[in-house]
Image: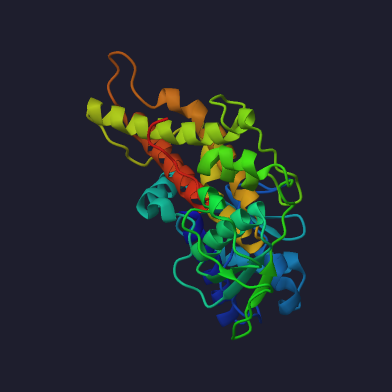
Amino acid sequence: MTPVELSRTLLYAVRRAVDDGKLAVTVPERVVVGPPGPGGCGDYASNLALQLARPAGQPPRAVAETLRSYLVGVDGVTDVVVTGPGFLNLSLGDAAPGALVADILRRGPRYGYADGPGTGVVSLHCPRELRALVVMDSVARLLRAQGVTVRTSCEALPPPEWAVLLGDARVDVTPHPIDVSPDPRNVTLRPLPVPATDPPAVLALGPDAGRWALLHPAPHDRPRPGAGEHLAQRETNPLFRVRYAHARTRALLRNAADLGFAPEPGTSAGTERLTGALADHPRVLAAAARDHAPDRLARHLVAVADAVLPLLPAVLPVGDEKPSAAHRARLALAEAAGVVLAGGLSLLGIDAPDHL
C-alpha cells in the first residue's frame, strides 16, 4: 500500500464511521500521512483523529479508537496503534516498499503531484528583487503541482540579465498585488534579499547553482552566493550530492541493461531510511506549496540523496555473481530515488543531468 492509497483508506474509514453514526463530521477532502513522530511506531502516522475531534465533539483518542476499528483488518494494514493524544500509527505489510517503488516508477516525475486540478486560485506578487523572483517562480511550480491555479506579478520589470536564473518564467508587471475574482488568495513574497552588491555573483553561478543558492536557504536566511561553495564538485556541496546521486542512479540503469537485467520493485533489507524519505515526498511537496517554502523541498532532496548514496555500491552484482531478485529490487529502489530527485529539482527550476 502506497502513501496515497493509505490516505484514501483513512478517508474511507472516516466515511464508514459517519455512515454508521459513530462520527458526526464532514469527511475531509484529503488526509496527510507521514513518518511516525517521537513515541510513535509502525510505517506511517496521521493526526487525522486530532483534526476531527472538535467537530465530532469527542476526545481525540476516542475518535482515534473509532477509526482504528475500521482500519484493523484492511488489506495491506497489519496493525494500528493509537499513541499520544490520538495519533494513528499504521504498520503495513511486507510488500509496502515494493508497492511504494512501483507507484513512484508508474507516476514518474509527477509522483507527489495532486491527482487532478483543484479549485483554488493563488495570486503571487513580489518586489523587483532577484531572489524574490526566483522564489516566486519555484513557489508557482509547487502550487501548480498541487493542482492550484497560480497568477504571478512583480512590481516592475526585471532587468534582462536576470533571465539567466528566471529562464522562461513570465510575470505580469504591476506596482501592487494583482486582484482577480472570485476571491483569490493574495500573497506577497518577500524573502531576505540578495545584498545589492551580490546579484552579479549569483548570476555568475549559472542557472542551476544560482537558483540553488537562492532557494536552499530558508526565506529568512541570507543567501551565500560564493562560487566556491555552490560550484564545488565535492560532497560538502549539497547540490552536487543531489545531482550526483541522480546521475549515479541513471548510470546504474545503463550498466544493469548491459548486464541483461532490469529493475523489479520488491523488498530489500536495510533500506528503511531511503523508503521513508521517498514515502514522505508527497507530504513535503504539499507542505512546501502550502507554506510557500521551496527550501523545504531542497532540504528534502538532500535527505533523499544522502539516503540513496550508501545503497548504490550494492545494486549491481560483483564478479561472477548473477543478478538476483535482491539486485533487481535495489535497482528499482535506486531508480525511484532518481525519479524523485529529478522531479524535485525540476520544481526548483534546476536541471538533473544523466551524466555528471
Decide which of 235, 132 is in the foreground and name it: 132
Quadrant in the picture for the N terminus: bottom left
Q: Residue at x 47, y 28 (%)?
A: 311
Q: Where in the figure is residue 197, as x and y percent of width and height?
A: 72, 43
Q: Residue at x 47, y 33 (%)?
A: 245
Q: Residue at x 69, y 44 (%)?
A: 217
Judge left or right: residue 331 versus residue 65: left
Q: Is residue 184 visible?
A: yes
Q: Is residue 92 visible?
A: no
> Relative to 128, does residue 237 appear above or below in the rendering?
above
Decide which of 233, 15 is in the foreground and name it: 233
Q: Where in the figure is residue 75, as x and y percent of width and height?
A: 45, 58
Q: Where in the figure is residue 236, as x and y percent of width and height?
A: 62, 26
Q: Residue at x 58, y 56 (%)?
A: 159
- State the count of labels: 0
Colour scheme shown: rainbow
Which quadrant of the view contains residue 226? Answer: top right
Q: Where in the figure is residue 50, as x and y percent of width and height?
A: 72, 66
Which quadrant of the view contains residue 157? Answer: bottom right
Decide which of 37, 108 is in the foreground and name it: 108
Decide which of 330, 158 is in the foreground and name it: 158
Q: Residue furthest bottom?
A: 182
Quadrant in the picture for the C terminus: top left
> Relative to 287, does residue 67 appear above or below in the rendering?
below
Which quadrant of the view contains residue 123? Answer: bottom right
Q: Residue furthest front?
A: 160
